[in-house]
Amino acid sequence: MTPGSNPRYPVFLALHGRRVLVVGGGPVAARRARDLVSAGARVEVVAPFANEDVVELAAAGDLVWHRRDFEVGDVADAWLVHTATGEPAVDELVASTAEAARIWCVRADDATQSSAWRPAVARHGDVTVAVSGGGDPGRATALRDAVQLLLEQGALPVRPRRAPATGRVTLVGGGPGDPGLITVRGRRLLAEADVVVVDRLGPRGLLDELEDDVEVIEAGKAPHAHTLSQEEINDLLVQRAGEGKRVVRLKGGDPYVLGRGGEEAIACVAAGIPVEVVPGVTSAVAVPAVAGIPVTHRGLARGFAVVTAHDGEVDWTAYARIEGTLVLLMGVTKLRTSAAALVDAGRPASTPVAIVERGTTQDQRTTVGTLADIADRAAASGVTSPAVVVVGEVAGLHRVLAEGATQAESSGAEEITSRGAG
Ligand code: SAH
């Protein structure tokens, strides 16, 4: 064996159900043992003392711990040996015993004397990238971390090239717009999609990262674009998935918060198409948050309700009675009637209201007022959709918490704060 001088031969091992020996009970051995258990190996640890992880795994029946010193007979019948005792003489004995038995042995103390090496590993769904640093573990780890980050950012071409056995639909909540506010899972599934059906709202910036041959379909609601009806969207999802495609329905916020995601899921289920939902950061909570408005706050609001103000059929009397914050989505066009209805139903006209337009984007802007004057203020400053309307005492916290909200003292000027200009 002339380790180090020869190129290494990478290989992945199917260890499921196979006996693997780990000698040593310290943190390195424990980490290896845990990894091996995850890979389904039948792990046996030999060590006079072991750290908590090993003890726990043993107690759970995930591995067997022999509480004693290593004996040469231990390697027999093992498919693989790891030695990490912290004592070079013991590691040497384990390695040479394994070598004589033609069993691969990973030595933690001295990689150059090892017959096998454990690479640094980046994982992403079912993708595994194994990295060797040419005998420099720090270099391998640094490179692995960089790869892991790129994988998580969806910056590497992880899209499967082999067609799936069956197509599927994933309803991905994209968050309110900032690409940093999609979930890791959502981002991964987006990077793996063959077809992406998108709305106007949500993290549209992520579309630039899709590979050229990914089919991107605009579901519409863009001012001048053709808008697909909900039924057409449902049919499209079912049809593309039926062709064996991985379809991602990328939606703004959370798919099941006033997003009609439930209808899309039901359409898939009815057509026998596998469908999964990946929850998202809803604008109902996140957009107030980034404008310095917690939807609940000790002493101000014990709870909150989210309602669409769009369809004109809201029972404002009922919502007015709810203790806590009211969050109105799609609330711009009917703002005047909604505010008046809430006052008629008993909410004080002096209740603070904040309207946050285009939350989490560069053009975020907040307009504040009261139920009595918010409609006039919104009209004066030209408030447009998309915007979240927050009704309740918490809206007053905007002034305290929002970035750049502290400077203006003169009346009127403090009512509007922009994130871009702030
Ligand atoms: N499913 C989405 C809501 C869809 S309804 C969610 O969970 O966020 C569309 C409404 O959401 C818009 O009319 C607006 O009221 C709100 N909205 C979505 N994104 C927004 C944003 N970035 N800024 C302000 N309001 C937003």
Image (cartoon, rainbow, N blue to C red):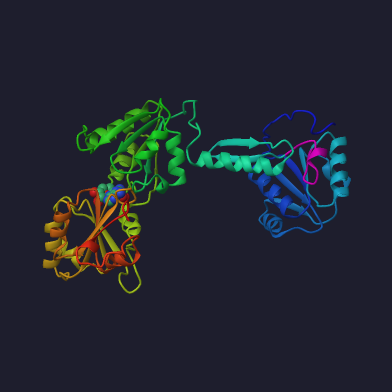
**Relative side of 321 to 115, left or right:** left
**Relative side of 20 to 294, left or right:** right
In the rendered image, the quadrant that contains the C terminus is: bottom left
Q: Viewer-proximal residue, 355 or 381?
A: 381
Residue 340 counted in the magenta span:
no
Residue range highlighted in magenta:
105-117
Residue 315 visible in the current orientation: no
- 16 shown above or below 321: above
Q: Viewer-proximal residue, 414 or 8?
A: 414
**Relative side of 127 to 100, left or right:** left
Q: Quadrant of residue 371?
A: bottom left
Q: Residue at x 68, y 53 (%)?
A: 61
Question: Given the current orientation, which residue lies at the most extreme bottom position?
Answer: 299
Q: Residue at x 22, y 67 (%)?
A: 410
Q: Position of residue 15 (x, y in %)?
A: 69, 38
- 345 shown above or below 93: below
Q: Position of residue 336 (x, y in %)?
A: 12, 58
Q: Viewer-proximal residue, 274 or 120?
A: 120
Q: Position of residue 57 (x, y in %)?
A: 68, 54
Q: Position of residue 155 (x, y in %)?
A: 48, 36
In the rendered image, the quadrant that contains the N terminus is: top right
